[in-house]
């Protein structure tokens, strides 16, 4: 049976390769924006890797922490929690210096109608963080959606593909990158742009979105006919290991699984597992938001959790009444409206 505890334990168990890389990371690690979907498990994963490696390292988790359960989970795991609203004047100055920063703060959903807040979170704040921590190694969480929609036959956008953001959300994410890129050029800050496409964690993600629609008899639109995804535990490992690859000028890394996955195929797989029919509508277009993560695999190997395993786990989670974060990915979206 799936439980919240089992899921969190699974996502915070470091792999042997990660433990070895943790030994090579010098200095403490601070996660800014650690209260979101990925931050708590990332912080715990980092702490667990330190324990497995037999090294002492402070792992800071910085967030407003509106969810007291997330805060308790981190404190119980030995993470140093700092409650802070990074948008408040003077908040950054109050934080301790730190050699390694993983920058996860940002805003996506609710952009439509509140564009100014999205730009403030995704561009104004990064400019100040880049200045405050200009002497640190910084892994900047970004999105594969800053690339243009590309043909599925292309294999996905590579790190050399020019950005082509559609809509204000992805434009502001590119602005976030440019702020840190400027710091790398101006101050020699070592930076890596972590361009992630669809983390999967059973409580949310594109597989959850597809599976829940199939399970509840809802219709799935097929126009955006394929996608990439990666297990959240693997994505978190790669994010921390990426501290070893930060550079000046800033470097870029696409992060996802190796497959280009058909929405139609995924829906039919879930339908088989649930014993129902998938309701599909429309025809697939030949292109989608897709990235090529060959560079990532070359540096760090393939993800530990495979696609078929994620599909089975996702079906079991939904059938057993597992909790949902109610944060849809909007994987169907092609016009940048969030």
Image: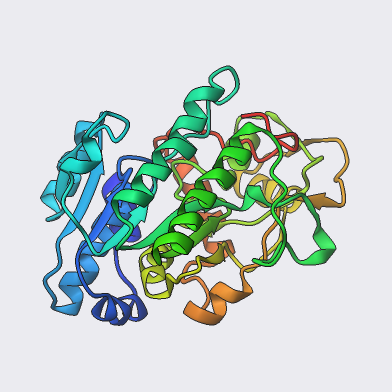
Q: Position of residue 5 (x, y in %)?
A: 26, 49
Residue name at image x 62 percent, y 40 percent: 170
- Numbered circles on residues, count: 0
- The vertical placement of 209 against 286, above or below, is above
**Residue at the limit of the structure toward the front, as seen here:** 186
Q: Is residue 128 left or right of residue 223?
A: left
Q: Residue at x 43, y 57 (%)?
A: 183
Residue 6 seen anywhere in this rendered image of the structure: no
Q: Residue at x 58, y 17 (%)?
A: 113
- Quadrant of res 240: bottom left
Q: Position of residue 27 (x, y in %)?
A: 20, 70
- Farthest top residue in view: 113
Is residue 300 shown above or below 164? Answer: below
Inspect this view and state whether residue 173 appears.
yes
- 3 or 187: nearer the viewer: 187
Relative to 20, is 94 above or below?
above
Horizontal arrangement in the rendering, residue 24 relative to residue 226 (left or right): left
Q: Can you tell which quarter of the image residue 241 is in?
A: bottom left
| Residue at x-position 54% and y-position 55% | 196
Q: Position of residue 287 (x, y in %)?
A: 82, 51
Q: Residue 166 location, x and y as percent?
A: 71, 39
Along the viewing direction, whichever of 273 and 38 lies nearer the viewer: 38
Check the picture and name the quadrant holding the C terminus: top right
Q: How is the image coloured?
A: rainbow
Query: In the image, is 170 to the left or to the right of 22?
Result: right
């Amino acid at each position: 049976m799936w439980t919240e505890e089992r899921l969190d334990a699974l996502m915070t168990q470091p792999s042997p390769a990660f433990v070895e890389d943790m030994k090579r990371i010098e200095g403490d690690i601070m996660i800014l924006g650690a209260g979101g979907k990925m931050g708590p498990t990332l912080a715990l994963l980092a702490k667990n890797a330190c324990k497995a490696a037999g090294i002492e390292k402070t792992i800071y988790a910085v967030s407003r922490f509106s969810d007291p359960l997330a805060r308790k989970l981190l404190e119980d795991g030995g993470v140093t929690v700092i409650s802070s609203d990074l948008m408040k004047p003077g908040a950054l100055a109050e934080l301790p210096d730190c050699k390694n920063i993983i920058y996860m703060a940002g805003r996506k959903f609710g952009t439509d109608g509140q564009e100014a807040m999205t730009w403030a979170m995704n561009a104004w704040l990064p400019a100040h963080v880049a200045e405050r921590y200009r002497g640190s190694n910084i892994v900047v969480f970004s999105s594969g959606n800053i690339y243009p929609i590309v043909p599925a036959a292309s294999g996905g956008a590579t790190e050399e593909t020019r950005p082509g953001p559609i809509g204000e959300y992805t434009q502001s994410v590119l602005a976030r990158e440019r702020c840190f890129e400027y710091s790398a050029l101006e101050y020699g800050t070592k930076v890596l742009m972590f361009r992630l496409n669809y983390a999967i964690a059973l409580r949310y993600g594109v597989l959850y979105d597809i599976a829940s629609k199939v399970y509840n008899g809802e219709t799935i639109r097929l126009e955006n006919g394929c996608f990439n995804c990666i297990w959240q535990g693997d994505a978190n490992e790669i994010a921390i290991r990426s501290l070893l690859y930060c550079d000046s000028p800033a470097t870029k890394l696409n992060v996802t699984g190796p497959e280009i996955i058909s929405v139609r195929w995924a829906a039919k797989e879930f339908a088989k597992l649930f014993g129902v029919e998938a309701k599909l509508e429309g025809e697939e277009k030949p292109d989608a938001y897709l990235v090529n993560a060959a560079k990532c695999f070359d540096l760090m190997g393939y993800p530990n959790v495979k696609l078929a395993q994620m599909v089975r786990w996702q079906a079991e989670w939904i059938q057993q009444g597992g909790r949902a974060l109610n944060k849809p990915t909007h994987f169907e979206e092609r016009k940048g409206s969030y």
